[in-house]
Amino acid sequence: MKAKGAIKQNAIWLVFIGMVIIFSVANPTFVKPTNLIAISRQIAVYGIASIGMTFVILIAGIDLSIGSIITFVNIFCAWLMVNQNMPMWPAVLLSLLCATLIGVLNGFMVASIGIPALIATFASQTIFEGISYLISGGMPISGFTKAFDLFGKSSLGPVPVCAIIMIVCFLVGGFILNKTYFGRYFYAIGGNEEASELSGIRVNRTKYLIYALSGFFAGLAGIVMLSRTGSAQNTAGKGYEFDVITCVVLGGVSVNGGVGKMSGVVAGVLIIGSLTNGMILMNVNQYMQMVVKGIVLAIAVGIDCMSKKRQAV
Amino acid sequence: MSEEYALELEHIRKEYPGVVALSDVTLQLKKGEILALIGENGAGKSTLIKCCSGAVVPTSGHIKVNGKVFSRMTPQLAAENGIAIIYQEFNNVGELSAAENLFLGRPIRKGVVIDRKAMNEEARKAFDQLKIDIDPNELVKNLTVGYQQMIEIAKAIQQNAKVLIMDEPSAPLTSNEVENMFKVVRLLKKKGISIIYISHRLEEIFALSDRIEVIRDGEYIDTLITKDATVDQLIKLMVGRDMSQKYPERTSKIDQSQVVLELQHVYGNGDKDISFKLHKGEVLGLGGLVGAGRTEIAEVIFGAKKKTAGKILLNGKEINPTCPKDAIDMGIALVPEDRKRHGALLTVSIKNNVNMPIYQRISKASVINSTVERNTTKKYIDELQIKTPTMAQLVKNLSGGNQQKVILAKWLAADAEVIIFDEPTRGIDVGAKQEIYKLINKLIAEGHSVLMISSEMEELMGMSDRIIVLAEHEITGELSKEEFNADTIMAYASALDMDKKKEEVAK
């Protein structure tokens, strides 16, 4: 029974390992260090953003605004640095602060007003997509200092800095969930909000914290992306919320709240990242890639749901 | 032999990883009889009936329906062989009419169009047959729980059920509705349908059943002929020990000089002008009818609802808790009525439940001190004798009595001085009830004070040192221990002649 449990718990990792084997056999380039480094760069953006989303989904919420936050941070940070001649660090910190405040706004709408998370974050998605256009006038902004390459382009030895940032973020995320008291609150609220409040949890405050964290991590993802691309585009983060939700749900975080682990989400991010990369190497048609990704998501979640069904009996 | 029985379960064994839920349980249901199945929570009643419906596959043993042997059931086989189960939660669709619910999934049609007229007619016939008065056109959400249950029963009969299993059917019903349900059940028996009736309420079992089967800890204990059985005998069989002393004696003394909690003309959450004092080491009972405002005042004291006027004093100091966390930090705790919805956090572990109110206190720079966390949990698992293999067990896997203990452990860990119990033993079986009573006494002996809301008259009088009665959100009477009397309490509780009672008291 124990072995069975271990397999079930780590099914997602088995899927990942299986996929790596298939891709390496199909195209040996896949496992070459240069390619692995490329993958780590590719997944850094949604990897970082997935941490905040994990918290949000754990309390049975959703954050559709993160794609817009990524775009906003791209435009806003570039605008500060290029149009306002602000030095890099103040611009980065100010951008992250704004991203966090967008999260706080989401928290306000969800917790204090009581707008369903889906609608509240959809509203701020639209709002900040618009504001990004207003700032940029629809034109891309580029021409950053060399120092700004740090977040997306430079490496520490062979390891890209953006991958290090992602790993640190995952460690912080895991630490929050496993070691801190508010991490316990996330699981409790996801299981039952009313009972959590009556157990002495300040549910609304915790929601503010969670949406703020989601905003912060999306903002950080935006900075990494801006540094990687070297140019702020108004479409930079478009659709990212769906990639991120896919990673999180693939990683076993239940959309009903209360269930999920950071390690699972890491696996989810790795699967989506290597799947995308592997298919590109195998010259799979772009639209076919979408088909495959959709199928993988359905199968992964399907397996999870089926094992839960069996458990229930 | 086999023709005598409609349903036989023989040597049923069910194992879950690490637990034997049923071991060698046998049940024989005669044709046209009402067999009561009783046992404490966690005795295995639900698992046993799930074996009949096919929701659970037994590890060994077999099931005979009308003499036909099955090693396992599936939901479909059960339906084909006329076994139907009425669960506590109904499968009705509120937005559809009574008739549509009756024919849910197999509507009467004319081609592709639903034949509403024929359906209503058939539904009328089905309801008439059971002598129940339901308008087939009425939306189910507008019907009372009692009628919704009738629709479930009618549905089962429509689908040719020969064996009807009813799991705690009276739990959600009012006493009038229970009477009606009894009539229907007796009618079904006359029609030759065999019934397994599961209930905690022994008086119902004596009123209704022909025979009684008792199971305990997953094992078959005995089957009795109802008319030869006694209540004491049944309780003894169920809990395996003598329960003659239902409300354990308290030896500790109330410290009349020390008022722990005092309410002065408190208004809010619908309640009006509530004033009372709770002394150290006292159990103050709050009596009254459901909806009289007892839970409401508890919510105000606990900070879950706002107070609009008046004063709450804790140890002589005025307090104004604005949320449960405030109240908890001040030393007030609430064990709510609805354990599963408001009390326990079912989806997280015992350890997390016990520590939830104190996580912030036992954290340094947001990081939980896991040694303290584990020790606290272990201490209360031992102290309250919570039955569980590990402290990592999810609370949803515990029995009702053990869940209640986990909630209590949480408040003891939080060091609550005043503990408010709202219906402390609702849905808990006889044996576990007494354990809860003993725990309340232990709390009192350790210097805690208790405010206890209870709708069970016996419990209220058995456990309280003093009772105040509410009606229509106001206090209508107070009784000291010597004055305890069910009739007086009921008189105070019925608000209809409240003024008259007030006059009487004045005289």
Image (tube, rainbow, N blue to C red):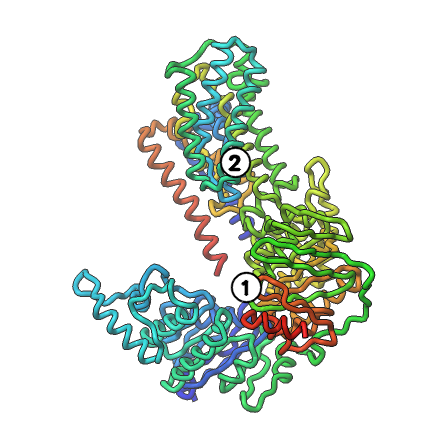
* Chain letter of the residue beneath label 1 in the structure image: B
Residue ID for mark 2: A107
The front one of B154 and B241 is: B154
Looking at the rendered image, the quarter that the C terminus of chain B falls into is bottom right
Q: In this view, does A197 lie to the left or right of A113?
A: right
Q: What residue type is disc 1 on?
A: Gly
Q: Is residue B303 above or below residue A17?
A: below
Which quarter of the picture shows residue B472? bottom right
Viewer-side residue, B126 vs B229? B126
Q: Position of residue B112 (x, y in %)?
A: 18, 60
Residue depicted at 47% across the width and 69% down the height: B50
Q: In which quarter of the image is the N terminus of chain B?
A: bottom left
Res. A12 visible in picture: no
- Whole-number angstrom distance, CA of label 1 to CA of label 2: 35 Å
Label 2 CA crowd tier, 10 Å (few <14, some 14–19, many 20+): many
Q: Which chain carries label 2?
A: A
Above or below: residue A202 compared with residue B4: above
Residue B246 horizontal/vertical position (percent): 69, 76
The secondary element bearing badge 1 is classed as: loop
Q: Which residue lies furthest to the left in this view?
A: B111
Q: Nearer the viewer, mark 1 or mark 2?
A: 1
- Residue A294: image x %, image y %? 36, 38
- Circle on res. B291: 1
Residue A234, image x, y percentages: 39, 20
B387 in relation to A253, above or below? below
Q: Is A74 displayed left or right of B429 in the figure?
A: left
The 10 Å Cα crowd at callout 1, few under 14, some 14 to 19, many 20 or more, is: few
